[in-house]
Amino acid sequence: MIPSFVSPLRRARFQVPAPIMLLIGMFTLHTGSALAVTAFAHASPATVTWLRLTWAAVLLLALGGRSLWRAVRASTRRELGAVVILGTASAGMMLFYSEATARIELGAATSIEFLGTLVVAVAAMRRRRELVWIAAAVVGVMCLTRPWQGNLDLTGVGFALAGAVCVVVYIVLTQRVGAGFGAVHGLALTMTVGSLVSAPFGAPAAFAAPDIDLILFTLVIALLFPMVPFLLEMVALQRMGRTAYSTFSSLEPAVSLVMGLVVIGQAPVSVQVVGMALVVVAGVGAARGDRRDRPAAPDPVSVLRRRAEEAVAAGPAGVGTGTSVEEPVGAGEAARAA
């Protein structure tokens, strides 16, 4: 099953434009997120999230195969430590996001979490005038959550903000993990750690009252998010510049709003549409403000060639020193790296 899935994906790398792949991944991701909300009526957000992470880990471990274990044996303690921290941040992202979407609308939760991405993007540019994009996004989030109505779920907002903090950690560590592992290997290890970290919160209820329908449903959700989006994104990252990638990624909150409407009927009012527009504009503005249009992720072949050249240049003394080139693992991002 896994090889039959990967083969079309490899062909799609050359046949489907990278922006289209990225958009398909976004819509798939937020379809999965919206469907997860419907599962909260049958199990807690933590249980649903743990099942999704576990399914994703199992599928990605199978996809990694024997080469994954060789990569683990060859890695250093520092690289494994980075994987543990990144996996913990990933689990936090998904747990907090699920708890948020159980309490507030999907578009609002996504926009609040998107603030983490925006903060990293603006901080990387180190220009004070870029703070206007964070201000615009904050105003947009205010329009989405409408605190002036007095019925704002502060717990849901708090969970979404906690998710935004996890996004910052996730972005910072993504390239570090990518320096020691390939995209699929990095994702497999990250999801495995995420499953283990989230197990105390979600596993007890799943084992106490096993629900076969729920277990199979979360398998479908896991394919929609994180499996398929992350793999599509992994391929798209090899063919897009960072500015183009970040610009398209800025559409994610709007996609979330649309899927919340289509899948679970969360219809936005006018002020929320305005707020979403502000968040998207802020993301696009921050992306276009980065004039360094570097590749979002280096091509794996060029990375291997560069490593070989460095090993040759270093001579016998450099062999086996563990020289590596930073390579984003591609999941949330470089996934969300603007």
Image (tube, helix red, strand yellow):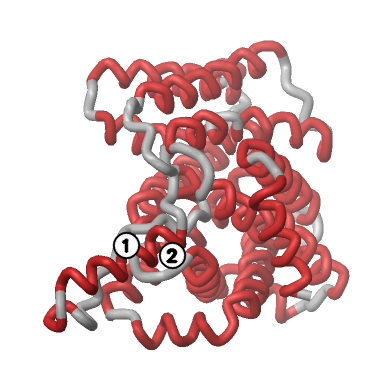
Image quadrant in which you'd find residue 210: bottom right
Q: Give the image location of residue 232, x and y in percent.
A: 64, 52
Above or below, 203 relative to 245: below
Q: Give the image location of residue 3, x and y in percent.
A: 73, 74
Q: Which residue is mark 1?
A: 306
Nearer-N-terminus badge (2/1) = 2
- Label 1: few (<14), some or many (≥20) within 10 Å? some
Q: Give the image location of residue 185, x and y in percent.
A: 50, 72
Is 266 situated left or right of 232 in this image? right
Q: Give the image location of residue 33, x and y in percent.
A: 70, 48
Q: Amino acid at mark 1?
A: Arg
Instruction: Say which residue appears at 47% left-offset and 43% top-offset.
Output: 336
Is 127 situated left or right of 179 in this image? left
Whole-number angstrom distance, CA of label 2 to CA of label 1: 31 Å
Instruction: Return the residue found at the far left.
Output: 317
Quarter of the figure that contains the N terminus: bottom right
Instruction: Say which residue appears at 28% left-offset and 35% top-offset.
Output: 124
Question: Closer to the observer: label 2 or label 1?
Answer: 1
Label 1: which secondary element: helix
Q: Amino acid at mark 2?
A: Thr
Q: Which of the pair 243/284 is nearer the observer?
A: 243
Is 11 situated left or right of 119 in this image? right
Residue 90 visible to an observer of this rendering: yes
Residue 30 visible to an observer of this rendering: no
- Label 2: few (<14), some or many (≥20) within 10 Å? many
Instruction: Say which residue appears at 31% left-offset and 21% top-offset.
Output: 131
Image quadrant in which you'd find residue 49: bottom right
Image quadrant in which you'd find residue 273: top right
Q: Which of the pair 37/43 is nearer the observer?
A: 37
Q: Which residue is mark 2?
A: 88
Label 2: which secondary element: helix
Instruction: Say which residue appears at 58% left-offset and 53% top-offset.
Output: 235
